[in-house]
Amino acid sequence: MDVTELARRLIAFDTINPEGHEAEAMVFCEDILRAAGFDCQIIPQGPGRSNLIAMKGNRSGRALGFTGHLDTVPLGGTAWHYPPHEGVIADGKLYGRGSTDMKGGVAAFLCAVLNAPVPPGGVSILLTAGEETGSDGARTIVKSGPLPPIGALIVAEPTANRAVPGHKGALWLRLVFHGVTAHGSAPTMGVNAIGLAMKALDRVTQSDLGAVHPVMGGPSLNIGTISGGLNTNSVPDRCEVTLDLRSVPGIAHDTLVTKIEACLPKGTEIARIIDLPAVWTDPADPWLAKMTRLSAIHASQPGDPMAMSYFSDASIFTPALGGVPTVILGPGEPGLAHKTDEYVELSRLNEAVEIYRAALGQWEG
Ligand SMILES: [Zn+2]
């Protein structure tokens, strides 16, 4: 099966998350890989949902790993010009939900591993469900048992085939401030939870989150939502706030939580909604440098290091694999992810297969 046809077949599965329903697409990939001699293990992820680990070659060595997710985001409110699950090809582009993010990438590495000799050390594939809602599938895989012995990881998220050494981390927090209610005409009789939140958020936004990264820049903090109070003439006893922190390598999320906690009045609840650390491989790492060269040769992409703005399953897999060199490199167009009439360039799909095959050819385990 060629890469375009494989991508079309994957796009035909409606894996919009929520609900996901990735299991059928996962079994489709499992069947292809099994037929090619891979050992496959399905890891359940609730009703109609699953993840897949597939391995081929020397298990005691260090395999070259590929990872991708099979869920997609919803279609959005705008009508699509091309039906989102039919994989229409027009003007050298393959249209459909998930074409860029990231069924095109998955199709490309499946094609590469099916058609290339198994490298010393072997090859491993991690296919996930539930990435778009915070890497739920990757977490399930990691909890299910030891990962295959992977020596370097390729994440086929959309980069237009540029070799990208990492992305920021995401730490989303929910804060609940507690006050004491009273009549609105006698505010001194109560403790205003919104007032507590305002003062604390002032301290939060002024706190030093950590050092600037040479490529990614500094960490950031956004107050995303705030809600409190039931009626105008009562002192609110509850105020809920959510924060979106983006971290850079070298900043532990535990440290960030401690810094935020130090700004909060006693009794404030703090909970993590999403907790995905930053991913970064030194661009001078010999394997990453090889991947950067392959990207330049096959996709004419520049070699200077950059970081993606999105996060990926690498936040879960790379630390679980002991911090192995990781590259984000996939055929999708990063600017089109999650958009109406998302597409992947057919030329990028073919370039990605070439890059992955070359990576397999150069992998020594
Ligand atoms: Zn993605």
Image (cartoon, rainbow, N blue to C red):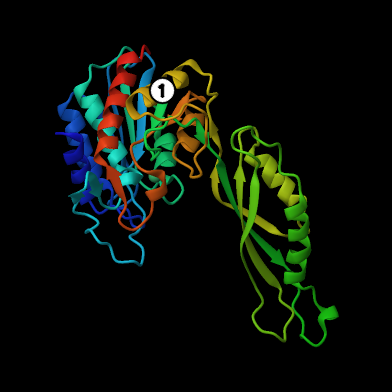
Q: Which residue is drawn at 36% across and 21% down?
A: 64
The amino acid at mark 1 is Met
Task: Tell me if 164 is positioned left or right of 23 in this view.
Answer: right
Question: Is residue 157 visible in the rendered structure shown here?
Answer: yes
- Residue occupied by mark 1: 291
In the depicted structure, whether residue 65 falls above or below residue 222: above
Residue occupying image coordinates x 63% and y 41%: 253
On-image quarter of the C terminus: top left
Left or right, 285 with reference to 355? right
How far across and how far down the image is residue 155, in percent?
40, 33
Residue 42 appears anywhere in the view: no
Q: Quadrant of ligand 1?
A: top left
In this view, the residue in front, 315 or 346, is 346
Q: Where is residue 199 in the image (x, y as percent from the top left)?
A: 79, 63
Name the residue rendered at 68%, 37% in the picture: 212
- The secondary structure type at the circle numbered 1 is helix
Nearest to the observer: residue 150 or residue 92: 92
Q: In this view, does 258 lie above or below 283?
A: below
Closer-to-camera residue (9/272)? 9
